[in-house]
Image (cartoon, rainbow, N blue to C red):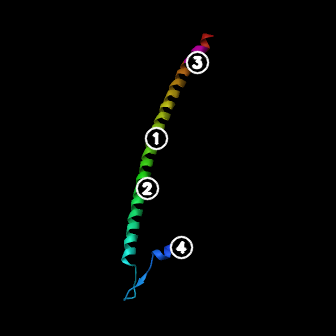
Amino acid sequence: MDVSDSECQKTSLVLNDAGHVTLPFAQISDLDNEKHELERTVNELKAKCEAIEKREAERRQVEEKKHSEEIQFLKRTNQQLKVQAPRREYSH
């Protein structure tokens, strides 16, 4: 993994007296702020996604209703034509 110089400078690890690696408080604070910003972004994107899903579900429902109405209209028209067709044959 390539790490740029700015990324290397961004994270400077410190070895404490107990031999544990720690981050300076300023870096912890920066990382915490970045985490909160990323969480906010995730929440915004989730909200946008939910809004799109809701809008598409509503659009799909409208399209399905229109389709169903069209099918019913065509069935009625077909039935009327079937009833009228024998009359036309006898009228000639």
Q: Position of residue 49 (x, y in %)?
A: 44, 52
Label 3 element class: helix
Residue at (54% x, 19% y) in the render: 83
Label 1 element class: helix
Of the two numbered discs 2 and 4 on the same chain, state the one appearing first in sequence: 4
Magenta-drawn stretch, dominant element (helix, strand or loop): helix
Numbered mark located on residue 59 in the image: 1
In the picture of the structure, the residue carrying the numbered disc 3 is: 85
Quadrant of res 45: bottom left
Residue at (58% x, 18% y) in the render: 85
Q: Are marks 1 and 4 in contact (CB under 8 Å)?
A: no
In the picture of the structure, the residue carrying the numbered disc 4 is: 4
Amino acid marked by disc 4 = Ser
Q: State which quarter of the image contains the N terminus.
A: bottom right
Label 2 element class: helix
The magenta stretch is 84-88
Of the two numbered discs 1 and 3 on the same chain, state the one appearing first in sequence: 1
- Report the mark closest to the observer, 1 or 2: 2
